[in-house]
Image: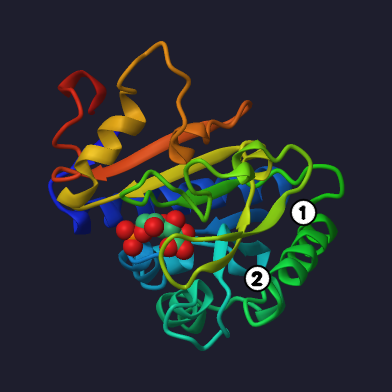
Amino acid sequence: MRTFATGEAMAEAAATEVARVVQDAVARRGTCLLVLAGGSTPRDLYENLSVEPRCSQIAWSSMRLFWGDERCVPPHHPASNYAMARETLLSRVPIAKESAHRIHGELEPKRAAELYEKELRRVAGEVLPRFDLVLLGVGTDGHTASLFPDTPDLLEEQRLVVATVSPDPPRNRVTLTLRALNASRQVMFLVRGEDKASVLRDVMVPADAGSPQQLPAALVRPREGRTLWFVDRPAAAEIPARQRT
Ligand code: 6PG
């Protein structure tokens, strides 16, 4: 876990890491499959990627962008994760519209999930797409993407995308499943703010080491990939010093 004095410092370091991963993926495989997170935490990161020096470091024409989840609202709606990424990143960088594979939140949720899974398999691999980097946040209840605690979605072993329901509005969501997330080469969690301190402790240090971890954010552990945590100091307040770097 890398901790930073402020959220701004975290976003700056995260932009450096994203640019490094993208360059490495493009150099090795000719393309980079990057999954964007929703919510508010990634805004600074996306803006950092859209300005120099990172903007020129990134081979935007070799990128394929996806979303980890979406609220079932139209793409111009203020709650849309796509709208947030368009405002802070897509509208500012030279990436082709067809290289940003959004989840069609304006459709009926199950239909949107089916179409997104088909798009994923068409672009990223029929059997099991392997994303180069997945950006994720953590909710105060331990959710990540739109995988919420105590839901059957956490047990999904076949599908890559499901329609689900959030306890908070907008309720209807579409999300990547753990099967899709855990096939990734690298996952980067971005966590900031003192309101995340207790849930981050529960994710990183389960109350009872013997009990199976149930918080969705703790279940994202790519089998053949790396999990990075970028956390600001207020969010890391309850993490033992030995787990911070
Ligand atoms: C969403 C995100 C969700 C988010 C967390 C943290 O659609 O809201 O996918 O998983 O990352 O809720 O949100 P904040 O960054 O706003 O704290």
Q: Is mark 2 on a helix, strand or loop?
A: loop
Q: Quadrant of the C terminus?
A: top left
Q: Quadrant of residue 61?
A: bottom right
Give the residue type that dot 2 points to.
Answer: Ile
Q: Quadrant of the N terminus?
A: top left
User: In percent of the image, x 26 and y 32: which residue is there?
Assistant: 201
User: In percent of the image, x 46 and y 81: which residue is there?
Assistant: 92
Looking at the image, can residue 230 be seen?
yes
Give the residue type that dot 1 points to.
Answer: Ala
Residue nearest the viewer, comparing 225 with 103: 103
Protein image colouring? rainbow
Q: Is mark 1 on a helix, strand or loop?
A: helix
The percent position of residue 6, horizontal first and vertical second, equals: 15, 52
How many numbered circles does the render carry? 2
The percent position of residue 241, horizontal first and vertical second, equals: 16, 23
Q: Earlier in the sequence, mark 2 or mark 1?
A: 2
Image region (quadrant) for ligand 1: bottom left
Q: Residue 103 carries which label?
A: 2
Residues at marks 2 and 1, CA–CA distance in whole angstroms: 15 Å
- The residue to which callout 1 is attached is 124
User: Above or below — where is 18 with respect to 240?
Assistant: below
Mark 1 closeness class: few <14, some 14–19, many ≥20 residues within 10 Å: some
Label 2 vs label 1, nearer the camera: 2
The percent position of residue 228, horizontal first and vertical second, equals: 41, 36
Q: In which quarter of the image is residue 169?
A: bottom left
